[in-house]
Amino acid sequence: MPLSEPAAPASRDLFHAISPADRAAMAAIRQALAAAPALPGGAAARAAFDAYVLQTPANPTVQYEAATVGGVPGWWYRPAGAPPDRAVLYLHGGAYVAGSAAAYRHFGSQLAGRVGVDFFAPDYRLAPEHPFPAAVADATAAYRGLADLGKQRLALSGDSAGGGLALVLLASLRPLAAADPQRPTPRAAAVLSAWTDLALTSPSLETQAANDLLLSRALLTQDADLYLGGHDARDPQASPAYGDLRGLPPVQLHVGTADVLLDDTRRYAAQARARDVPVECHVWEDLLHVFAASVGTLEAAGQALDSVAGFLRRHLGE
């Protein structure tokens, strides 16, 4: 199926043309997705979503450990030889209504093994049982818990809704740091296909609708309504695109052009640059939402994960 032409990436975005091998792999992925039943929205998606995420191959050098950090249950993804003083808080995707730290362990192991530090993925509470701001409160508590464990060099990462939540946390921790200067603030954040605007105003929701076989405006509207529970979608604690980005540490973003959330990433990157935030925005031709989960199938998946890992290592300290 020919793809409609996306808008050209902003001049300061880093554009990655699709390789011939990935073009062939994407054709097969699209064929499989077109034949598969669509994921439902809301809590009904949880079992199918977890099964989908678990298809990412595991990194055999990384071990998993269920734990509670800051009062929030979750899982450690621990690579061999990880230094004791640093960690990454990883916030999983699932549109705030699905996803789990256990289901993300294979994908998380791919990142943790590349970075070489411990990752903690909290099982933040999900909507509709626990609407906004429960996810923000749990992410904040887990971050504080990592600091209380002696993790002095910390970074944030996440994908989709979790990527947006990581960017919410990145901004919201600044006043907390001012109140408690001894508590470490994040050194960087790296996110994949982040959902940054729950008001759903990004043009790519329309321009890329025919290209995206995973997400749609209708699905995102349903899940945003469940999460927000009537709260203002433009609250920066829900949608980081509406936040004050001044003074943030370095941010790296990745997104595919066949993603209805393409402009959620590009607009956030442009806003961050306008506030003098050091930002890298990587735009990957013809690739779908959170394409990095297809490591082992797509060359670009491994390349994106390597880019995230190098970025996090630089800012956490080699």
Image (cartoon, helix red, strand yellow):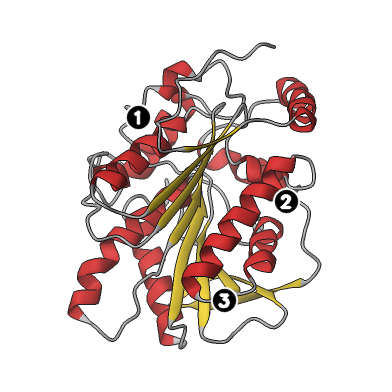
- Residue in the picture at 70% in, 25% down: 37
Q: Looking at this view, is 318 or 246 the one in front?
A: 318
Crowdedness near tag 1: few (<14), some (14–19) or many (≥20) residues, C-alpha within 10 Å: some
What is the CA distance from the residue labelled 1 to the residue labelled 2? 28 Å
Task: Locate the N terminus and report the quarter of the image it occupies.
Answer: top right
Q: Earlier in the sequence, mark 1 or mark 2?
A: 2
Q: Quadrant of residue 210?
A: top right
**Whether residue 121 is visible:** no
Q: Amino acid at mark 1?
A: Leu
Front position in the image: 291 or 226: 291
Q: Which residue is mark 3?
A: 318
Question: As shown in the figure, which amino acid type bears the numbered disc 3?
Answer: Glu
State the image coordinates of residue 146 (x, y, percent, origin top left): 45, 79
Side (left or right) of 74 relative to 114: left
Secondary element at image label 3: loop
Q: Position of residue 275 (x, y in %)?
A: 23, 49
Label 3 CA crowd tier, 10 Å (few <14, some 14–19, many 20+)? few
- Residue 239 drawn above or below residue 218: below
* Separation (CA) of disc 3 from disc 2: 29 Å
Q: Nearer the viewer, mark 3 or mark 2?
A: 3
- Determine which residue is flagged by label 1: 200
Figure check: 180 above or below 161: below
State the residue position of label 2: 54
Residue for point 54% across, 54% down? 92
